[in-house]
Amino acid sequence: MWVKKTEQEIVDSRKRLQREGRVAAIGLWLLFTLVGASFPGYSEMRGLYLLPVREILQRAPVVALTMFPVLLVYWFWWGNRRKKNALNVSQVCLRCGATKLSDGVDDCPCGGAYVNMDEAKWVREPGEKE
Ligand SMILES: [Zn+2]
């Protein structure tokens, strides 16, 4: 059955989502930096597809700085997307277990109340066998 998470559990899972967003943004930044630093620009094409490692390392800090705005844009987009989704999240009825997308109505026909899925968790019924 579905039960509402404790405040602490809700805070924990929100924190985990934020951490995942940060890790994704930084991972993306490192990836772009590596890719950007590894390939010679058109002006310096010397028949090489990849630059020597020494040159990649020399270029990396400059490329990392250039990529920083990309990171910020991604961060902004991530936060914005989550805000937009706030009106379109899954909800579950704690009484009958029905699910729906949030539409501003929290009352379930069964008489129970819908809560956001990220505020609820599934637990085994008391006495239910594994
Ligand atoms: Zn219900």
Image: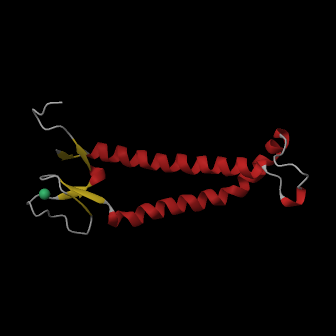
User: For this view, does 109 lie left or right of residue 31?
Assistant: left
Q: Nearer the viewer, residue 96 or 19?
A: 96
In what quadrant does ligand 1 lie? bottom left
Query: Which residue occupies 85% across, 41% down?
Result: 52
Q: Nearer the viewer, residue 65 or 32?
A: 32
Q: Residue furthest right?
A: 46
Q: From the viewer's perspective, is residue 42 above or below residue 39?
A: below
User: For this view, does 9 lie left or right of residue 78?
Assistant: left
- Where is residue 129 drawn, in percent x and y? 14, 31
Q: How many marks?
A: 0
- Where is residue 95 drawn, in percent x and y? 12, 52
- Where is residue 106 drawn, in percent x and y? 19, 64
User: For this view, does 3 lie left or right of residue 78?
Assistant: left
Query: Which residue occupies 57% across, 51% down?
Result: 25
- Quadrant in the picture for the N terminus: top left
- Quadrant in the picture for the C terminus: top left
Q: Nearer the viewer, residue 98 or 78?
A: 98
Query: Which residue occupies 32% across, 60% down?
Result: 89
Q: From the viewer's perspective, is residue 4 above or below residue 129?
A: below
Q: Residue furthest bottom?
A: 104
- Where is residue 69 drawn, in percent x and y? 65, 60
Residue 55, by quadrant, is top right
